[in-house]
Image (spheres, helix red, strand yellow):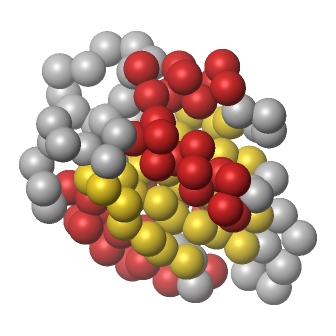
Amino acid sequence: MTTFLLATGSVHVTAAAADYLQDRLDPATDEIVVVAVRDPDAPSRDAGDAVNVARSRLAAFAPTTETRAGAPLTELLAAVDEHDPDELIVGPHRGTDDSDGVGSTAAALLARADRPVVVVPLP
């Protein structure tokens, strides 16, 4: 059994992660936890929309979903401590069109996580 934690704050990240997970998840044994963080700098509906996309795109896997408010890195590290996933899945950045490369949250997770972190490319 593998537990995946999908860290998201946008529908774009969630959709890219769902594409990545489709062929990797075994619905009989694997578990996915979707943690959407309401970033104070992002539109307030983004986290809720991200969770809805996860529920829809990953419905066959019955993901556990939660929405948190606060600093994304702090909230995601707390979620890792609580859920103890085998693998973290993140987007390279919030999913906005004006972002280039890997954002600060993804970079910090790559530096601090003690388990595999997969950065999924956005379309």
At horizontal 14% and vertical 61% (from top left) the residue drawn is 45
- The N terminus lies in which quarter of the figure? bottom right
- Residue 51's quadrant in the figure? bottom left
The extreme left residue here reads: 43
Where in the figure is residue 67, as x and y percent of width and height?
A: 37, 66
When the figure is inspected, residue 96 is found, relative to residue 53, above or below; the finding is above
The extreme top residue here reads: 101
Where in the figure is residue 99, as x and y percent of width and height?
A: 26, 20
- The answer to whether one can see residue 12 in this image is no
- Residue 68's quadrant in the figure? bottom left
Where in the figure is residue 113, as x and y percent of width and height?
A: 71, 33
Total label count?
A: 0
| Residue nearer the viewer, 70 or 115 | 70
At horizontal 69% and vertical 53% (from top left) the residue drawn is 81
In screen coordinates, is 120 left or right of 122?
right
- Residue 101's quadrant in the figure? top left
- The C terminus lies in which quarter of the figure? top left
When the figure is inspected, residue 122 is found, relative to residue 80, above or below; the finding is above
- The answer to whether one can see residue 45 in this image is yes
Where in the figure is residue 33, as x and y percent of width and height?
A: 59, 67
When the figure is inspected, residue 108 is found, relative to residue 120, above or below; the finding is above
At horizontal 76% and vertical 64% (from top left) the residue drawn is 3
In screen coordinates, is 122 left or right of 90?
left
At horizontal 74% and vertical 57% (from top left) the residue drawn is 85
